[in-house]
Amino acid sequence: MVMARGVTSADERITRAQSDLHRTLLIVMDILVAATVAATHWLPVMVGQPVDGRVLVGYFLLMVMIVGVVLRWRFPAAAAASVALATLLGALLQVTIDPMLATAWAVYPLALRRGFRRGWLRLGLFLLVFLLAAAFGSRQLEPFVLSLLTAVAAVACSWTLGSAVGERASLAAEAARERAHVTAMEQRLDLAREVHDVVAHTLGTIGIEAEVAAHIRSESEEDLRDRMAEIAVNARQALAQVRTLVVALRSDDLDTAARTPSLGDLDRVFERARAAGLELEVDIRHVSALDDLQQLTVFRVVQEAITNAVRHAPASRCRVRVARSGRLLVLEVSNDDGPVLRTSAQPGHGIVGIRERVAAAGGWCLIGPSESGGFGVHVELPYFSADNAERAPSERDV
């Protein structure tokens, strides 16, 4: 856990450093743009003139323009308004010849956040810029008219570009939020399935064991006490697993759910089933190198199938077979001498959970009454190991 926190902290420091560098580069660029506009459109007009009130106001407006350009990202609306007002007043006082270039530069962040989100408005601005460009080349224009057209074109281009980029960023953020929501819902569904499997198996087995203990009169007091102790252990284990899953549901990190069951944990499932009166015949062989998802799938499928057998046919004989067949891992759980479990149009959560788990692992399953009168679960999963690295999941599904 300490290592994980250290890695997270390092990642956060790197991200923060990158963000600070990007912010610094933007500030440097804004300073260069402000200095360029000042050196080319303000200072040549004011330098050399007698220092009077008009020129002093011009220098003040120049400082307002520079500060507004530098602060355009922090205060978009105020910066754009101040730069535009300073430029217009400077033009009226004849202390600048800037055709709103600084204003166009300051307007971009404002358009990025609050620009047009409708395509026809941006198209209208593009047409306006096109018409202005055509007017430039059509005939000789007066300097004032040329400056006015340049100002309108510059601000319109900046606003249009900022609006388009802002809309794209907004759509990307919305798509990211939607993906995060879907991922969270899928993770919560997985956790809900885990809770169902734990509760259905453990508590169902506990109930059968308690009923058996209540109806057997030949057991001694010591045997009965041992059986009750076994029920208590099972109950505590189920409570611990449910508590772990509930904590994961309440936390932001849904991937911390306990997905620890593996093939080695099936022995405990078999012991509980036998204690509940189920006669088990287990055959697990030639199975190795399964990944965590496959082991969890096999464990939960066997657990759910045995839970159904204990609940609906506690005194029957159940066969469990897990073996490799070529590139497939075949899993079968059947109780041929038990009662038929009638499947309805809307199967229970256990059967639905089996199908969802098998599909997530790239396999297929067949669940239903068997020909001999019992009930069976047949699952085929893609099997891969060191000597069978290529895996092609089956597209069959039931």
Image (tube, rainbow, N blue to C red):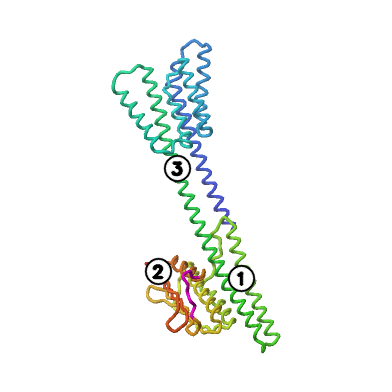
Does the CB distance between marks 1 and 2 fall below 8 Å? no
Decide: is 141 above or below 69: above
Disc 3 and disc 2: Cα gap in Å?
A: 39 Å
Give the labeled residue for mark 1: 238
User: Residue 19: image x %, image y %?
Assistant: 51, 41
Q: Which residue is mark 3?
A: 169
Question: Could you classify mark 1 by the number of other residues whose Cα lies within 10 Å: few (under 14), some (14-19), or many (20 or more)?
Answer: many
Q: Residue at x 41, y 22 (%)?
A: 99
Badge 1 amino acid: Ala
Q: Residues within 10 Å of mark 2 (few under 14, many from 20)?
A: few
- The region drawn magenta spans 340-347
Residue type, numbered disc 2: Asp
The dot on residue 397 is 2
What residue is rendered at 57% in x and 55% in y?
252
* Amino acid type, residue under disc 3 in the picture: Ala
Q: Main secondary structure of the magenta part?
A: loop
Q: Position of residue 209 (x, y in %)?
A: 62, 80
In the rendered structure, which disc, 1 or 2, sits on the residue that comes first in sequence? 1
Q: CA distance from mark 1 to mark 2?
A: 32 Å
